[in-house]
Image: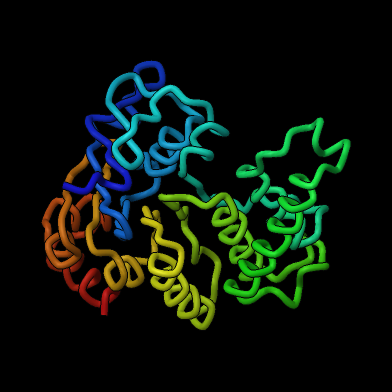
């Protein structure tokens, strides 16, 4: 059997007396698209911080392609094949668009300081490959025409695209997207939806997605996990999750009949 791109089992962490994530299990197949949803404070971003090595779990396991990454540092996890974007965009704001991507692509470089100082043939070849790869990514993300603009000067939607390009530059096996359409207008959301769907095939990457836009989640995700106060209250295909009474109550916080109608409407 092919190993899961991302396999998380019984993952838990507590901060003081607060159990932030409790016995989380998520399995994302190669090129899978899995949604992680829940109300504010449910523990979703904490999960991303656990997966990327920002936090170390109290218990549980994390595997990429069948290999454990538990206990690795964030940069080691990035090299192992896991990249992320952030709910609050974290670009290198003073660098231009192209250099933002080139910096990320350097994760895969083999040339060390010695070769870079001497500008050896390996270093020069790698620098050229990184430049070409970075420009290709900007082209795919639709922002190649902005490569010499400062990252902080980009429109909001293009900053989101640049963050995804930067994550892809590390050549991930799994891409974590933290609210990729937050703050976007309807047209930008529609374009981002198509982009997210195309990334899996184009870059052979699995995606774990945090998003509050229920219409987007229900439309593009194959499988969804729902958290509430760190506890998994539902998991399954979109139609199953959409009609789960526990999800309706916890996620929307309104009477069941009204919530069911709201979820159905948002997914349409």
Q: Position of residue 72 (x, y in %)?
A: 47, 25
Q: Residue at x 39, y 71 (%)?
A: 197
Tell me which corner region of the image, top left, top right, bottom left or bottom right, holds residue 256.
Answer: bottom left
Q: Residue at x 32, y 47 (%)?
A: 5
Horizontal relation, residue 180 to residue 111: left or right: left
Horizontal relation, residue 252 to residue 93: left or right: left
Seen as rendered, the residue at the extreme bottom is: 187
Q: Position of residue 173 (x, y in %)?
A: 42, 50
Seen as rendered, the residue at the extreme right is: 118
Seen as rendered, the residue at the extreme top is: 16
Whether 215 is drawn above or below 123: the answer is below
Horizontal relation, residue 168 to residue 101: left or right: left
Whether 78 is drawn above or below 90: the answer is above
Q: Position of residue 193 (x, y in %)?
A: 43, 74
Q: Residue at x 32, y 72 (%)?
A: 215
Whether 246 is drawn above or below 190: the answer is above
């Amino acid at each position: 059997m092919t190993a899961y791109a991302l396999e998380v089992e019984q993952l838990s962490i507590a901060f003081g007396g607060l159990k932030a994530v409790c016995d989380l299990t998520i399995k994302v197949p190669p090129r899978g698209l899995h949604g992680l949803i829940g109300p504010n404070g449910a523990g979703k971003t904490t999960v991303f911080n656990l997966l990327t090595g920002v936090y170390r779990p109290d218990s549980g396991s994390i595997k990429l392609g069948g290999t454990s990454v538990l206990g690795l540092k964030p940069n080691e996890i990035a090299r192992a094949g896991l990249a992320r974007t952030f709910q609050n965009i974290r670009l290198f704001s003073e660098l231009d668009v192209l250099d933002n991507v080139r910096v990320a692509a350097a994760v895969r470089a083999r040339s060390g300081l010695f070769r870079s100082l001497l500008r050896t043939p390996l270093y020069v070849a790698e620098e050229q490959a990184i430049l070409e790869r970075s420009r290709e990514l900007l082209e795919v993300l639709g922002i190649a025409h902005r490569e010499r603009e400062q990252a902080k000067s980009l429109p909001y939607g293009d900053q989101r695209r640049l963050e995804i390009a930067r994550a892809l530059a590390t050549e991930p096996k799994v891409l974590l997207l933290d609210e990729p359409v937050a703050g976007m207008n309807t047209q930008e959301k529609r374009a981002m939806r198509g982009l997210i769907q195309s990334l899996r095939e184009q870059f052979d990457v699995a995606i774990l997605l945090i998003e509050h836009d229920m219409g987007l989640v229900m439309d593009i995700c194959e499988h969804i996990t729902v958290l509430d106060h760190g506890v998994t209250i539902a998991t399954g295909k979109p139609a199953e999750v959409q009609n789960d009474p526990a999800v309706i109550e916890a996620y929307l916080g309104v009477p069941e009949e009204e919530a069911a109608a709201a979820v159905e409407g948002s997914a349409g």
